Image (spheres, grey):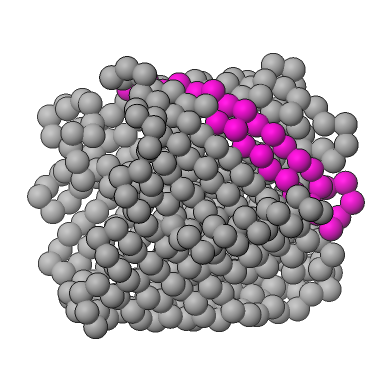
């Protein structure tokens, strides 16, 4: 208990200091925040042709490969009799940028690999990192139209809190859609649609497959050049399939947002509003009605100086879980990045998440996490990093609490 209280105090202090991470406004169904972050990083990289290492005509390519070696002291996320193992994860990455015309460009990114367990071979599996996919931008006057398709295969069960204790958890997620942005300088409007598919892989707990339709609309004005404020709305339909009796559902939200560039080094965004979750109770015998409440997502990014930049995010949401039941979630994350060591980069993330299942109020969890990663450019093309990560999850359901310690050594080679 003392350790947990100390951790919460540390998280509160982190919240007072501030941070950075890219979060879009509240949408009916958010497939993966990690995927959004990876896509934003890719978008920034695409703006610099020097980022790529091969040109074939007008098409720019970037190739790399890597190897990660992990020691995990609780590979099955068990509350008792934890089993440890070494895991080898070879991977390959390819990125492409093709400026088809002066106004249209096609971008692709794929990072995939294989996890091989030394002792627990039943856990071996392929993975595809979030942010992998293809994106096509079309510019027409004041409009920007984006067609996209993103795919990921996640493998770490602790990343899906509703699958606690399920060591064979793996999930394929795919999102395809289109959005259009109309920028009139003083006013901006965005309209979008996404179709999502979720497929549970090797799941011994019967995680349901799902498909969803998601729509969102937001519009804002700039009272001054540094501030964009407006309203947002979204809606989603989700259909579950599989042996788990999960009811289909709809969800909608309305709210407001504000983004502010407070300085050259400091940016903030706030999304807040009201959301309602409506399960189809005719399809199952779950004893649960509609759920509603407020949502809020806050993001702060700050470059303090040449030695430190960080992001801070916090929020509350009602999520339609592709990977299980719908949850009320509260999240806090602080991600500082340090560069005070010559030729080294240091990252020390902290996070906390609390969730309560809508259908079963006793199904609650709290997850605490912390990590430290030290990276270095070893040669012009070879880089390496050493990482430690601690995860603790406490659950309201018997046998689902656990702690997990992971030590990783990884290398990446740019061709």
Magenta-highlighted residues = 387-415
Magenta region's main secondary structure? strand
Is residue 76 positioned above or below 13 on the image?
above
Residue at 36 percent of width and 24 percent of height? 377
The residue closer to the viewer here, 12 or 254, is 12
Q: Horizontal and vertical percent for residue 54?
A: 21, 25
Relative side of 373 to 398, left or right:
left
Q: Is residue 106 magenta?
A: no
The residue closer to the viewer here, 258 or 107, is 258
Relative side of 221 to 405, left or right:
left
Q: Horizontal and vertical percent for residue 117?
A: 67, 21
Which image quadrant: the N terminus?
bottom right
The residue closer to the viewer here, 250 or 349, is 349
Relative side of 41 to 404, left or right:
left
Res 195 visible: no
Q: Is residue 409 magenta?
A: yes
Q: Which residue occupies the extreme left position in the image?
A: 102
Is residue 130 positioned above or below 143 on the image?
above
The residue closer to the viewer here, 99 or 332, is 332
Q: Quadrant of residue 139?
A: bottom left
Residue at 49 percent of width and 77 percent of height? 272
Q: Horizontal and vertical percent for residue 201?
A: 66, 39
Residue at 44 percent of width and 29 percent of height? 375
Which image quadrant: the C terminus?
top left
């Amino acid at each position: 208990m003392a350790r947990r209280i100390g951790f919460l105090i540390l998280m509160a202090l982190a919240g007072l200091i501030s941070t950075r991470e890219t979060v879009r406004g509240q949408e009916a169904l958010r497939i993966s925040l990690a995927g959004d972050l990876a896509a934003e990083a890719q978008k920034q990289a695409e703006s610099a042709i020097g980022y790529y290492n091969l040109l074939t005509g007008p098409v720019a390519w970037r190739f790399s490969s890597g190897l990660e070696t992990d020691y995990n002291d609780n590979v099955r996320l068990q509350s008792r009799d934890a089993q440890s193992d070494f895991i080898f994860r070879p991977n390959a990455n390819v990125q492409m940028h093709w400026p088809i015309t002066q106004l249209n460009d096609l971008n692709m990114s794929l990072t995939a690999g294989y996890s091989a367990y030394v002792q627990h071979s039943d856990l071996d599996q392929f993975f595809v990192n979030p942010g992998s996919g293809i994106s096509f931008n079309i510019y027409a006057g004041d409009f920007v139209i984006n067609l996209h398709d993103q795919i990921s295969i996640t493998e770490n069960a602790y990343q899906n809190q509703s699958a606690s204790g399920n060591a064979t958890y793996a999930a394929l997620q795919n999102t395809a859609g289109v959005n259009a942005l109309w920028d009139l300088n003083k006013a901006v409007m965005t309209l979008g649609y996404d179709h999502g598919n979720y497929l549970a892989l090797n799941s011994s707990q019967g995680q349901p497959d799902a498909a969803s339709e998601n729509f969102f609309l937001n519009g804002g004005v700039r009272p001054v050049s540094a501030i964009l404020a407006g309203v947002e709305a979204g809606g989603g339909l989700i259909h579950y399939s599989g042996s788990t009796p999960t009811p289909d559902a709809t969800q909608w939200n309305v709210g407001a947002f504000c983004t502010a560039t407070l300085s050259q080094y400091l940016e903030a965004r706030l999304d807040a509003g009201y959301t309602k979750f409506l399960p189809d109770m005719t399809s199952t015998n779950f004893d649960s009605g509609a759920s509603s409440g407020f949502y809020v997502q806050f993001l702060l990014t700050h470059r303090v100086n040449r030695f430190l930049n960080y992001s801070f995010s916090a929020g509350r949401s009602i999520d339609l879980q592709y990977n299980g039941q719908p949850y009320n979630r509260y999240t806090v994350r602080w991600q500082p990045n340090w560069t005070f060591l010559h030729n080294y980069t240091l990252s020390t993330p902290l996070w906390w998440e609390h969730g309560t299942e809508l259908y079963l109020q006793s199904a609650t969890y709290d997850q605490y996490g912390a990590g430290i990663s030290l990276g270095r450019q070893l040669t012009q093309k070879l880089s390496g990093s050493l990482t430690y990560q601690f995860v603790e999850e406490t659950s309201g359901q018997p046998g689902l609490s656990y702690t997990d310690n992971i030590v990783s050594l990884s290398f990446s080679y740019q061709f």
